[in-house]
Amino acid sequence: MNTKKTPRLFTRLGMLHLLKNEIPQAIVEFRKALLLDPTNLIALQKLANLFTLGGEHKEALKYYEKAISLSKDDLELRCGLAGCLEANEKNAESLAAYEMIQKQKPDYEMIEFHLSRVHLKLSHLDDAKKFYAEAIKRYPDDPDVKAFGTDIQEKSEKAENMSKKDSDLSVETGDKKERKSRKKK
């Protein structure tokens, strides 16, 4: 019986371990597949997803970037990469990735929500509000989208309060300058 160890075999073993929820063993098998074939897209994708789910975003990022280099038009991979970039606080890069997805497929699932979230992290409040309005229109019953409205509201109120404080400060500073100039006269 021929039991030649191939990338396909290790990929299948990884999938079997995933089915049994044996994550560490699955990771080992997918890595073995990549040792034999560094372009094994399935193994790259599975490792990227597993590390993302495990909260190991820096590790996941390596696998997403390699997978994207092999499959540039795969929107699922690109969305995973964008989310991973966001988790690594690389928000400008994440925004660019989400914008590329929207450009390729304007009706991509939840794209407005993703764009709104990243715009808010970048303090682009007007854009965050615009995309949120589109997201809530498209997904009115989604609990994540609904809850995000609170985040936007809080950020709007903070921005408004900061603007008011800045305005009050400039009026106060202007009054002091005016009093000083009167004293000199």
Image (tube, rainbow, N blue to C red):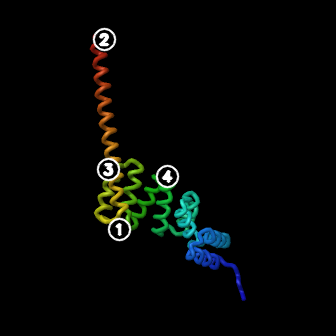
- At label 4, counting other C-alpha atoms closer than 10 Å, the crowd grade (few under 14, some 14-19, many 20 or more) is few
Residue at the extreme bottom of the image, as rendered:
1
* Mark 1 or mark 4, whichever is nearer to me: 4
Circle 1 residues within 10 Å: few <14, some 14–19, many ≥20: few
Quadrant where the N terminus is found in the figure: bottom right
In the image, what residue occupies the spot 32% across and 53% down? Answer: 129
Q: Amino acid at mark 2?
A: Lys
Q: CA distance from mark 2 to mark 4?
A: 52 Å
Q: Eyeballing the image, is 163 above or below 31?
A: above
Which is nearer the N-term, disc 2 or disc 1?
A: 1
Query: Measured along the vertical axis of the image, is residue 29 above or below residue 145?
Result: below
Q: Mark 2 = which residue?
A: 184
Write down the residue under mark 1: 107
The answer to which of 183 and 99 lies nearer the viewer is 183
3 vs 2, front mark: 3
Please report contact status of discs 4 and 3: CB closer than 8 Å, yes or no: no
**Mark 3 closeness class: few <14, some 14–19, many ≥20 residues within 10 Å:** few
Secondary structure of the residue carrying tag 3 is helix
Residue 117 vs 160, above or below: the answer is: below
Spatial CA distance of label 3 from label 2 is 47 Å
Question: At 70% across and 82% down in the image, what residue appears?
Answer: 4
Relative depth, front residue between 9 and 22: 22
Residue denoted by label 4: 89
Which secondary structure, mark 4?
Answer: loop
Callout 2 secondary element: helix
Q: Residue at x 46, y 53 (%)?
A: 91
Residue on which the image places disc 3: 153
